[in-house]
Amino acid sequence: MKQLYSQPGEAPPARGEAHDRRPLALVIGSGFGGLAAAIRLSVRGWRVQVLEKLDAPGGRAYVHRQDGYTFDAGPTIVTAPFLFEELWTLCGERMADDVELRLMDPFYRIRFDDGSHFDYRGSHEAMRAEIARFAPEDLPGYETLVAETDKCYRLGFEGLGAVAFDGLGDLLAAVPAMTKMRAWRSLYAVVASHLKNDKLRTVMSFHPLLIGGNPFAVTCVYTLITSLERRWGVHYAMGGTGALVRGLVQLLARRGVPVCCNAEVRRIEVEPGGGGRPRATGVTLANGARLRADLVVSNADTAWTYRHLIEPQHRRHWTDQRIDKGSYSMSLFVWYFGTRKQYHDV
């Protein structure tokens, strides 16, 4: 395959030709968020460069290769395919020309320590049949739980999913929706209020684990995930998650947006802006190179960005002490295995 990103040791592209007067945006990190931001910025008329510290794009979706095996590092499934399809549509292209997504059936197989398993599917009738195998008396409770998750989807995902919550006003505006969802309850508490069987409670509450959330602690707003899956399905990218990364990089390449690997950002440069408010003016790389820009977008972890990329005098709120006191989740702990055969029951 043609290499679509810079080779090890190559310097990132220059700021751009003198005749190109479009503003320049630098995107730190080539995970899904960084690649998506780069595509959206390019569509809006910006010149864009993506800076990645690893030797290949992907970020948390980096692909590891060892002893002839290929391992997807992080995300494995797609539950909101329309968010990816929109990126190709914005560019006047079709996602299907670059990436093949296949609907999974079942979505998940949850195995219990007694040898039993639950096949979690998108079909409402199939789910009712599985629930009846475990606890038919929980069928009415499942119906009321579905109604509640649909409400959280409407209020939480459709209503608040695109809100950045940049200020107190955004938070106050969300209070009515959060109140309607009674968002102070934990996800597990909501599931347990509808279902009595312990195994079914596990089946309907494990989803936050996929993003490092504790079902006993995270807000019940996360029940919207089950509604999201019923609407859009759970998909797998053929060729693994790396195929989705490659597709996004190819889309950027066709738009003239380079993804520069081995380009670790050491610092985001900040200067006083209009009204005394600081603004990012570029980045300094680990090799000492300084790249000026009109906009800097960081797709690195939020805490890492503030703690390590922005100097303390430019972040009165996110002080080192506040960041260090934060409680951080490791998301999933994953073991990778290379096998010489297929296991059809897994």
Image (cartoon, helix red, strand yellow):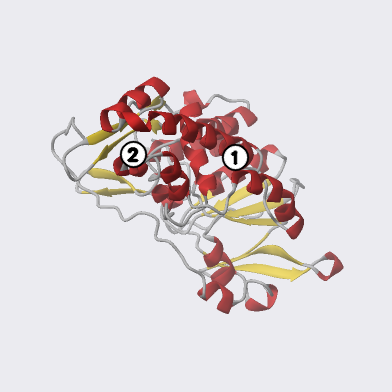
What's the residue type where badge 1 is placed?
Phe
Identify the element where label 2 is drawn. Answer: helix
Residue 236: x percent and y percent?
A: 38, 32
Instruction: Judge left or right: residue 345 versus residue 172.
Output: left
Image: 322 above or below 232: below
Image quadrant assignment for residue 242: top left
Residue at the image position 58 percent from the left and 75 percent from the top:
322
- Report the disc number at residue 41: none
Q: Which residue is mark 2?
A: 200
What's the residue type where badge 2 is placed?
Leu
Which sits in the foreground, 284 or 191?
Answer: 191
Which sits in the foreground, 184 or 197?
Answer: 197
- Report the disc number at residue 157: 1
For the C terminus, give its image quadrant: top left
Q: How busy is the neighbourhood of tag 2: few (under 14 within 10 Å), some, or many (20 plus)?
A: some
Tell me if I can see residue 6 in this picture. yes
Residue 79: x percent and y percent?
A: 46, 35
Instruction: Judge left or right: residue 289 versus residue 239.
Output: right
Residue at the image position 31 percent from the left and 27 percent from the top:
132
Residue 227: x percent and y percent?
A: 50, 33
